[in-house]
Image: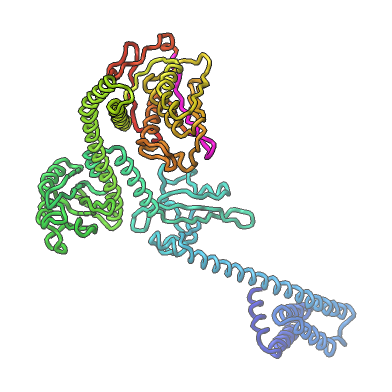
Amino acid sequence: MDVLRRIGERLRSDTVVARYGLAVTLATAAIGLTLVLSPVFPHTLTVLALGAVAVSTATCGAGPGVLVIVLVVGWFTALVAPTLDRGEALHFVLFALVGALIVRTSGSARASLRAAVGLRREGARRVRARLESLRAVTRAVDEGVYAIGRDGRITYLNAAAERMLGYRSKELVGLEMKAALRCNRIEGTCSGKTCRLLNVMATGQPHRGADDTLTRKDGSCFPVRYSSAPITRGGRIVGAAIAFQDITEERRAAKRERFLAIATEQLASSLGFDETLARSARVALPHLGDWCAVVLAGECGAAGRVAVEALDPARAHEGYEILRRTPVAPLAEDGFGIEVRTSAPELIREVDNLSDHDGSTARAREELLRRVGVRSFMSVPLRARDRVLGTMDFGIAGSSRRFDAEDLGVATELARRCALAIDNARLYQQAQDAIRARDDTLAIVSHDLRNPLSAIRMAASVAAGSTAPGTPARKASQSIERVCNRMNRLIGDLVDLASIDAGRLSILRTAICPAGPVDDAVDAIRPLAEQLGVRLELDLAVDPPRVWGDRDRLQQVLVNLLSNAVKVSARGASVRLRSRALPGTVVFSVSDRGPGIPLEHQARIFDRYWRDPSVRYTGTGLGLSIARGIIEAHGGRLWVVSRPGAGATLRFTIPLAPEAEVAEPERAPRAPGAGAAPEVGASRWAMEGDRRGA
């Protein structure tokens, strides 16, 4: 049939004469063979003629088939029919009918076959178009894509997969995926039922975001992140498509960030200068080589501070001895000053002849690298706050690894963080030195000034008592006494501030009744209130619980708050002092009817030396700062509530005394000057840490 179909296609593509000529030829051949074979086979004409009709119809169409019937019937009617009986004539009529049926049936079959062939060709064309479109898409994407069949063999690779794997597509197509690519993951080799790629074909569920390792043609491995999905055809899974991307750079970036984060955490764990310097050299190992030196620039060519760390202690000691006597400074003519002068990092991938390396290497560095055995070297400046502090040097001595541009970038970032840590430690050390100098000065001031002030005040008091009231001498003596008292309070405030900053404020805690320090403070402030015409109102809790505090310190806080409230109040106004017991604490509040405090100033009123520009009275600006320090040393809190034009209320809390201390009788307040020695049964508490919110 295929032969006849091809002959028919050839004839149909030729002229009409050729097709009908073939029909005439077949009809003539059938008649000729009938004349030859009829003596032996009486009905040969019917068989041969039907065959000619079928062949003509199948190869040349219905017209040539009908022509064969006409020619055979015509020959039969003209030459053979007069001599035949009725049975043979009937037989020939049947031939004509069967031939006509063959022509009709062959035409319909040929039309159906032609339609089927057309559909098949159109389907093949569409499949080829889709395949070409898919290949074009997969060639354009950066992700590698390959497909596998049900047997796990590779059936397709795109250009990106070829590039990443190093294979040509024809080298891998037909090979088993696991054997060719050796797909591994952290928990072991991908094989059997545990293979996530092959399980996609078993479950029919896509798999996304898995990290594996693939093997290139040269045997090297690289990490990938892939997604896979089943390939279906007619509702049946016939394979799987896998898309993957190289995540080598992502892994490197994550490793860099993890290293820098750990280094930053270690650098931030200490503020000591020497410890920070040593940690700066230590955090680089072994990520950035096996030898690291941090060399700070000295002044005027002198050698600065040095820290050297190495995986081999002998190399660390050797490097330290050389660097300790080598100057690193902008004015130094020899040594490691090039990075300080230029502020540019330097990378020497292969340390061969250093004297020829751009002429920038000094004899000291040649000696260092030669004696330490460095094979690859980097040096980056330590820059902080627009100032170069020194250099940070890295070396590889004991391995075949060599530094590259990526290592230089990481080293530069690490050096930046180390420089900030070193500079912060330097500033912290300077601040501690300044605090110690201030404490020493305050100690001298408090001791050497208070003694003569006490003598002057005593002399003024004696002079005032020995003169008549209202005389100029008595007024002068009283003025001297007031100035001495003010100076003594100022010295005490400065000493208290220094103690608060240093965390050494002396707190002598006892279980006290809140009414005690309140009465003492009101008695102390009453002369000022009477002088300014301000009423003092008390609203205290009935039978309040005892608080756990220092009576003198609480009186000091209350005096500061009452003094400020009285000074800002108008003549005839009132200042109210209240106390209320709450669970676990007692709340004290001092309220006035003064001008109030603007909202933008409320956060600053506890800053030392800060005063609201609108207030009229004089002062040092230390009272509220000291009051907050004392309250926080007690474990309480001091805050302000105010509206402009409606006065201000300052509140603070003091914790209740422990039950074991409440049974003890309240101790008398300590005498002036006796703060250093605690009373029997009292507990001394020293504030630790910085003051909150000061």
Dividing the picture into quarters, in which one does residue 462 lie? Answer: top left
The spot of residue 3 in percent (x, y) is: 63, 76
Residue 503 visible here: no
Dividing the picture into quarters, in which one does residue 440 lie? Answer: top left
The spot of residue 221 in percent (x, y) is: 36, 53
Q: Which of the two residues, 625 or 548, is positioned nearer the viewer here? A: 625
Specify whether 47 is left or right of 484: right
Q: Which of the two residues, 671 or 608, is positioned nearer the viewer here? A: 671
The spot of residue 42 in percent (x, y) is: 79, 79
Q: Residue at x 45, y 12 (%)?
A: 659
Q: Compared to 486, does 412 lie above or below?
A: below
**Magenta segment includes 655:** yes
The spot of residue 526 in percent (x, y) is: 43, 23
Q: Which of the two residues, 555 or 377, is positioned nearer the viewer here? A: 555
Q: Residue at x 37, y 23 (%)?
A: 553
Write the start and end of the magenta stretch as one range: 640-658
Q: Residue at x 16, y 43 (%)?
A: 316
Residue 632 visible here: yes
Q: Quadrant of the N terminus?
A: bottom right
Q: Quadrant of the C terminus?
A: top left
Q: Residue furthest right?
A: 86
**Magenta segment includes 422:** no
Specify whether 9 is left or right of 665: right
Specify whether 321 is left or right of 539: left
Q: Compared to 643, does 578 lie above or below?
A: above
